[in-house]
């Protein structure tokens, strides 16, 4: 269930490289001032995407007609700044669809966060896992802020959960979770499902593009290193909890495996992905909707309603009180008695070689698909002609310097060629296959605040 994309969240590959229209290719930059043709192209692309892909065809048709009517009436004529035009299209779409994932972004600029999404980068973590701790009363605590592809997420989550096996109760903190992949979301829930009685945790009903027909995919619980069952589990939520983070809270609540404590969540359920709608703009188009097997519903527009309502800032204190551990403290740093998981801060020994190999293979147009995860195989095949054209003219790599491990478990490198450079993020599966890879201009994303 691709959600709000962080660095590696919910996507197998997202090579953000410029089309090979300049030599040497440059990282994407924001478009210049818009003219009538640029505005018209964006509206046409958005209308086509809505008609072909949006999960609710009738709503997509109304939204498409509304954009076209506004363009024809001259309501967009005075907008020349790309970011302002993206914001206006987003607002006009939201007024019709009321879908919190749907938004437009200008090329080279980060999309504005949907309502309820955490502004700024996530806290320092590994594959979305920030920490696990023991709290007063030997209560276990784990914070998860993102849900990257399962091949990336599973190892970090298992390592964080391992020392919590014998705790008498668990607090799962999703107050800063912005979403991610369905398999990772369901894997979290699987720790609390009796392995002898696997269940359908969630299912997704997705539109077949260009048609009014749909397909259904069901996600069932899967084996985990141990079963954390028969113990109290509390899930902390906030208005920032969004999309896949909401799915974890909603599904555990619906299956009566946990109780939620905190604020009502952001209310964005419908999965989709970012797609280009013109040379200057892209749009996140929700193509499906979740349907919980227990309730037959989801949380779109209403959020997950907490079992115990409390200000998000007080949710940890309240959950501990429900477990008999009264306290006036509200922060995990003040309450932690032992920190049991620390995110990795050194590179995977195989990541630099994997980057060099992958970029060399793209330049030759000959990827070794045996060394890619299934998701990477699929998207690399789709993008190979463009990627080959882009990288073939760059020559050999001059250097690859490790920068950091990002919050979603990817190793970040600055890769330099003779006439250009890129910042490359790569994540490997435990058996060394490339599970995710991204390329962007050097330095932090535009507008990003420093991570901690």
Image (cartoon, rainbow, N blue to C red):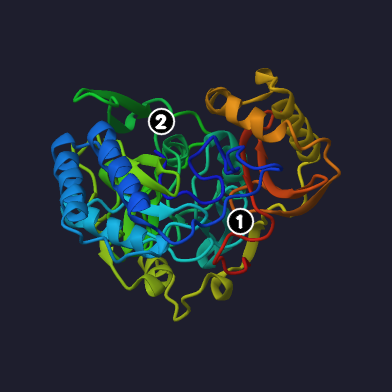
- Distance from label 1 to label 2 (Cα)? 25 Å
Provide residue 281's location: percent of width, then percent of height.
Answer: 41, 49
Q: Could you say which is closer to the camera, residue 240 or residue 371?
A: 371
Q: Which mark is residue 125?
A: 1
Q: Which residue is mark 2?
A: 221
Please identify the quadrant where the C terminus is shown.
bottom right
Q: Residue furthest bottom?
A: 328
Q: Could you say which is closer to the camera, residue 247 or residue 85?
A: 85
What secondary structure is marked by label 1? loop
Left or right relative to 57: residue 404? right
Residue sitting at 46 percent across and 39 percent down? 191
Q: Could you say which is closer to the camera, residue 437 or residue 10?
A: 437
Please identify the quadrant where the N terminus is shown.
top left
Left or right relative to 43: residue 98? left
Residue sitting at 35 percent across and 49 percent down? 37
Left or right relative to 372: residue 206? left
Provide residue 124's location: percent of width, then percent of height.
Answer: 61, 60
Residue sitting at 50 percent across and 74 percent down? 331
Provide residue 212's location: percent of width, then percent of height.
Answer: 19, 25
Judged by depth in the image, the label closer to the viewer, 1 or 2, is: 1
Provide residue 167's location: percent of width, then percent of height.
Answer: 53, 53
Instruction: Count numbered badges in the picture.
Output: 2
Determine whether 134 is above or below 20 in the image: below
Determine whether 273 is above or below 445 in the image: above
**Residue 434 in view (yes/no):** no
Instruction: Determine the image quadrant of residue 325.
Output: bottom left
């Amino acid at each position: 269930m691709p959600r709000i994309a962080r660095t590696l969240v919910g996507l197998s590959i997202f090579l953000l490289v410029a089309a090979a229209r300049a030599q040497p290719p440059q990282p994407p930059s924001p478009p210049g001032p818009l003219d009538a043709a640029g505005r018209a192209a964006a509206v046409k692309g958005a209308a086509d995407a809505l008609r072909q892909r949006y999960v609710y065809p009738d709503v997509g048709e109304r939204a498409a007609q509304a954009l076209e009517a506004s363009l024809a009436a001259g309501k967009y004529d005075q907008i020349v700044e790309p970011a302002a035009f993206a914001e206006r299209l987003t607002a006009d779409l939201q007024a019709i669809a009321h879908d919190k994932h749907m938004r437009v972004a200008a090329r080279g600029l980060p999309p504005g966060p949907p309502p309820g999404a955490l502004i700024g980068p996530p806290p320092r973590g590994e594959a979305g896992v920030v920490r696990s701790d023991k709290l007063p009363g030997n209560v276990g605590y784990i914070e998860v802020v993102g849900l990257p592809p399962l091949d990336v997420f599973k190892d970090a989550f298992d390592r964080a959960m391992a020392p919590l096996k014998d705790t008498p109760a668990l607090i799962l903190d999703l107050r800063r979770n912005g979403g991610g992949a369905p398999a990772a979301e369901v894997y979290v829930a699987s720790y609390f499902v009796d392995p002898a009685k696997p269940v359908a945790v969630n299912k997704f009903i997705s539109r077949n593009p260009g048609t009014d027909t749909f397909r259904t995919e069901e996600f069932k619980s899967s084996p985990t290193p141990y079963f954390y069952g028969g113990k109290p589990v509390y899930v902390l939520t906030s208005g920032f909890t969004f999309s896949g983070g909401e799915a974890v809270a909603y599904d555990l609540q619906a299956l009566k495996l946990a109780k939620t404590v905190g604020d009502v969540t952001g209310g964005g359920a419908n999965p989709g992905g970012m797609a280009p709608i013109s040379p200057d703009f892209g749009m996140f188009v929700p193509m499906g909707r979740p349907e919980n097997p227990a309730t037959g519903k989801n949380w779109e527009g209403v959020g997950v309603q907490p079992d115990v309502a409390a200000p998000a800032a007080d949710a940890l204190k309240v959950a501990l009180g429900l477990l008999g551990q009264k306290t006036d403290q509200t922060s995990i740093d003040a309450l932690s008695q032992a920190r049991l998981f620390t995110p990795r801060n050194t590179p995977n020994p195989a990541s630099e070689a994997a980057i060099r190999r992958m970029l060399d293979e793209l330049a030759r147009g000959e990827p070794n698909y045996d060394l890619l995860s299934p998701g990477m195989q699929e998207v690399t095949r789709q993008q190979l002609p463009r990627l080959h054209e882009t990288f073939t003219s760059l020559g050999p790599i001059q250097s690859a310097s490790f920068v950091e491990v990002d919050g979603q478990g990817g190793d970040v490198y600055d890769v330099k060629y003779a006439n250009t450079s890129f910042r490359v993020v790569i994540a490997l599966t435990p058996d060394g296959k490339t599970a995710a890879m991204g390329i962007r201009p050097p330095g932090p994303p535009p507008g990003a605040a420093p991570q901690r």
